[in-house]
Image: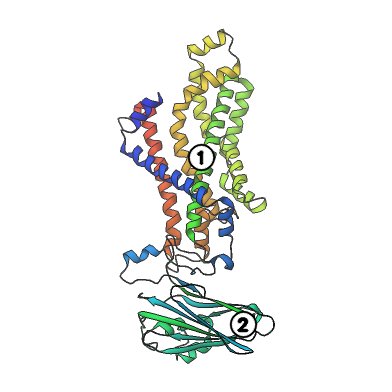
Amino acid sequence: MLRGAFKELVRYPSALAGLVVIIFLVAVSIYTVITIPYEEAIRLWRGGEEIWGDVPKLAAPAWFNNFTAKKRPLTIKMTSDDEAGVERKQAQVSDALWTDDVVYSFDYPYDDFPQEIAVTLLAQVREKAPYVSLIWVKPDGTEVRLADMAVEGGKRVYRVSQDEKLGRKLKLPENVNPVVGLFAEDPTAAEPVPMKGTYQVRLEGTLFEPEDTLQSKLVVYGTVYGWAGTDHLRRDLGIALLWGTPVALSFGLLAAMGTTVLTMLIAAIGVWYGGWVDALIQRITEVNLVLPVLPILIMIGVFYTRSLWAMLGVIILLSIFGAGIKTNRAIFLQVKAQPYIEAAKAYGASDWRIIFFYMVPRIIPTIIPSLVTLIPSFVFLEASLAVLGLGDPVLPTWGKVIDDARANGALYQGLYYWVLEPSFLLMITGIGFAMLGFSLDRVFNPRLREL
């Protein structure tokens, strides 16, 4: 029977398209769980500056450059221990003076300005803090002295955009980022353009004790990053998009199966035993049908818990006594009247054996299509709760990404990728399961084949 149903199913292009989408989502889920374990995903998603400090904020996906004439810059990161593009000279000047000079060289072929330039200095000293001078060198040889500073406390971070003195030194208008002044061919132009070529950052370090060490890191933050972009906390959205796939599929599948199977069993029990059992089930169903599910879930999320799995249990509990009870009851009433049910009773089959082995199998083909089409509805429900701010506070999900984008004005800032990427995944999930579910309905319901 299943083999014949599958042969019939593959005759429909919509079913094949739906299967391709579902297989793709399942493959992504398996890949994600294997390559990014749950604990690592939570650590990354809840990480702060120590994890995402070198990632640009609100950066579009890097593949945007393939569709625009104006190439946006990628992030450039270099450390004093790197071999490529870094020259380091250490020398002893006197008995109480040592120098540690580092020259960072990098090519800049882009048509837009970077977000920020940051130099991080790390020092291990006994008493006196090292002294460092930062010098910026343009491709045309122009030198700009950025700052002179002592590395107090073992760490110092210099950010160009926060240096007001540098802006005045470059004679920039008040609303112009000093980063633009360092990269522009003419910083005073009405519409400055970046100068392409090889830039240098010179660090001239002075140490006062032989055991002292000085390490540095240069980060030129781009405006595009990765395949999914970043959010307001510099987090790679790819983490949430990948992990949102197994979360969405598992939530939708568990909710759909739990609801469908329990609804079917409750309807079968009510029909078989009849009397007050059936009447009680019907009254509970009628009361449950008028209950507002979404407001109840909102109240639970506000006053009790926002755990994804607690919400799953409540959703199943509120859904099992739904309209499916009425539909399944009508089918089971016809099944109960069949002669083979009377024959089963005659040879002494128990009530539960008749329910599980004679009644339920007859209805399974009719609930498979509804089970498949029900999965995306629960996926959308979970995303809706997250968009309302009631998503799981721990798990990265598609709905949580949309909520963060809405709360931080992504659409007003033109950061459409932040909203469209999770929305697209929700859309193809719904389309994939819908196409497969409708095709299954035609296979198991011959009356629909001519439609």
Q: Are marks 2 and 1 in contact (CB under 8 Å)?
A: no
Question: Quick check: can you spot residue 147?
Answer: yes
Q: Where's residue 361, x and y in %?
A: 49, 23
Amino acid type at image mark 1: Leu
- In the image, 70 versus 203, the foreground residue is 203
- Residue at position x 32%, y 30% from top? 449
Question: Quick check: can you spot residue 390?
Answer: no
Tell me the number on the disc at residue 253.
1
Q: Is residue 176 left or right of residue 43?
A: left
- In the image, 220 versus 400, the foreground residue is 220
Q: Quadrant of residue 267?
A: top right
Q: Where's residue 350, x and y in %?
A: 60, 15
Tell me the residue that label 2 is attached to. Answer: 151
User: Is label 1 in a helix, a strand or a loop?
Assistant: helix
Q: Is residue 235 left or right of residue 7?
A: right
Of badges 2 and 1, nearer the viewer stands: 2
User: Is label 2 in a helix, a strand or a loop?
Assistant: loop
